[in-house]
Image (cartoon, helix red, strand yellow):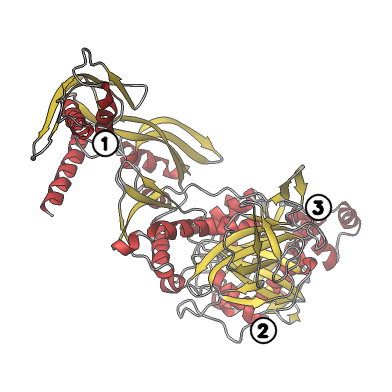
Amino acid sequence: MKEYSTEKIRNILLASHSGAGKTILCEAFLHATGATTRMGRIEDGTTVSDFDEEEIRRTISLSTSVIPVEYRDVKINVLDTPGYTDFIGEVISALRVADGAVLLIDAVNGLEVGTEIAWDYCTRFNLPRFLLVNKMDRENANFRKALQTVEDYSETRLIPIQLPWGEKQDFKGVIDLLSMKAYKAQGKTAEEIPADMKDAAEEARMKLVEAAAEGDDVLLEKYLESGSLTEEEVIRGLTLVVQSGDFVPVLVSSGSNEIGVIRLLDAMVDIMPSPLSAAKIVAQGKAGEEILEPKDNAPLAIYVWKTTADPFVGKQTFLRVYAGTISPDARVWNQNKGIEERLGSVNVPRGKESLPVKVIHAGDICVVPKLTETSTTHTLCDKNHPLTLPVPEYPTSLYQVALSPKTQADSTKISSSLTRLCEEDMTLSWHFQTATKQTILQGMGDQHIDVAIRRAESKFQVGILMEEPKVPYQETITKSASAMYRHKKQTGGSGQFGEVHLKVSPLTDKEFDFTWDVFGGAISQSYSSSIQKGIQGVMKEGVIAGYPVSGVLVSVYDGKEHPVDSKPVAFEVAGREAFKLAIKDAAPVLLEPIMLVKITVPEAAMGDVMGDLNTRRARIQGMETQKGRSVVTANVPLTEMLRYTTTLRSMTGGRGVFSMEFDHTEVVPTHLAQAVIDAHTKEMESRKEE
């Protein structure tokens, strides 16, 4: 692939609900511009965008693909993002490096939840956008109705720059309001607007010219004087109002039939900003904030927006060059790690292909293989001019599963595999839960987790078993109790002897405290550490249900020792067993984590959500309304929230979101606690039988 200078580059994101036609639109771009000889099909697994085994198996996009489209001597880096909400992290990473977006809606279904979410993120990123009404050839396609669904949702004004030439089976092309010409099929040749559409086109053109005139005082003055603007003037004004976010141009297409594809590419080239005119990025430099200049001779500034692990070619690192240039064998400074990396070959990605290039100019996107230390969100720069580029905020993943290795060999690989997966995907995270002794993987939903596990198995050859995570309960006591235990063991030669008397009491302000209250030297204080070791061993393992013990004050007040047989190990055992007996007599209870949950849902779903919360032992803390959406704050036990991601999604059609953080612990109701204790007892008995 040839080199493209900064002004000849467009970085455009495609986003929508799953199934609106992004991947097939990319196929149409490539075919219409001659990059491919035939269009691929999702059903056959032959599309350029969806090349991953999992994507082909599921017939949906799971990660963002870069599809460079060469048209009119401009390279449009099309970022084809997943539409399924579990993979929103991929969309956010792509939004971070895009300069504009095309949001697709299905001409039959109109605005769907995935497109709503993408629309809101584009607003958050201040990204200029087009709205594309796709699949205009479908049965029941309705341009006006589909457009209305977006107008009802968004406060930003929509301005059609195209009208559909027919609908459903009669959809044959687009009426272009910029050139006031009709374009049949792909749109390579212009013809006169049909007589029956002339009036509608004139009316829409007038609204378009008015909108374009708003972008520039000179244009507004000319329009008020003459009542018209040329095509070039309309494009100039439209470019300004689109970049400012005042208007969203509306276009039409049928990606699968390649109708309207060329005119869409024209609009991308003419109206969408190049990196030169896009919103400036502010980086953190040595002397404070620094505005990046998208120029080849500026200090190097590169953002790492995506990394993938490939079993055949190794680690692939996707970069957006914001300033400066890079070429093969260049050395760059990783500001996050404080190390130098050598780039090796530099390539332009196109699906799974990597096309080598000699120079990547400011504003372009590329991929480099086998960087050892560099991960997603890192900044690469000149060592002598250190910079840190801003990182977008990713949503907190709240869907959890517990993982265990299938075999002993897998257990050595599981940690490193999970770490590498989480480096690739910023919405995945993992940790070891000490209270339950489980490895926990967190993601955006069941599909997200399932894909991650399958990738670990195929890419890193590690076998993983999944189960629902246990709740990290704690054990504590509600009254004081005393106990003694004598450990005596005689096995020829010197034996073991230790006797410990201790008292346990509830402690509210800390997890554990220990006092030595032995008078008269009944046992030597040198055994104090051994007794504590035995007690703390039990505290980790639990007494009644296998969960850590906390909130206990232990006082050792008496005991006996033997001049020959007493040893530290004997007092460790005696301390451990005395502690267990005392806990059982101190009215032990289970404590459960209570979470502070904030749920945001459409007002229409409020009744269902409140009814469901009542079944989850929730205590409502407050309710408010924000921009037509209801926000509920509640305290809910964690055990009731383990699969809430899936429940909320089904109750609200995917429009509900929630955040959750630990708030405090409370005693588990007796009947629920007994079920947990019985399950632990049963598990321990089955282990003994094994």
Name the residue tied to disc 2.
34
Q: Are marks 3 and 2 in contact (CB under 8 Å)?
A: no
- Please report whichever mark, 2 or 1, sits nearer to the chain's N-terminal start: 2
Q: Residue 630: x percent and y percent? A: 48, 39
Q: Residue 674: x percent and y percent? A: 17, 36
Q: Residue 35: x percent and y percent? A: 65, 82
Q: Nearer the viewer, residue 227 or 314?
A: 314
Q: CA distance from mark 3 to mark 1?
A: 73 Å
- Please report whichever mark, 3 or 2, sits nearer to the chain's N-terminal start: 2
Q: Residue 357: x percent and y percent? A: 70, 75
Residue 185 seen in this snapshot: no
- Please report whichever mark, 3 or 1, sits nearer to the chain's N-terminal start: 3
Say which element carries label 2: loop
The tag on residue 214 is: 3
Q: Nearer the viewer, residue 282 or 423?
A: 423
Report the amino acid beneath label 2: Gly
**In the figure, residue 613 lies in which quadrant?**
top left
Q: Nearer the viewer, residue 167 or 35?
A: 35
The image shows residue 82, relative to residue 182, as above or below, that is above
Question: In the displayed structure, does residue 627 sit left or right of residue 413?
Answer: right
Question: In the displayed structure, does residue 498 sit left or right of residue 158?
Answer: left
Q: Residues within 10 Å of mark 1 (few under 14, many from 20)?
A: some
The tag on residue 537 is: 1
The image shows residue 404, relative to residue 659, as above or below, that is below
Q: Tell us which disc is closer to us: 3 or 1.
A: 1
Q: Tell us which disc is closer to us: 3 or 2.
A: 2
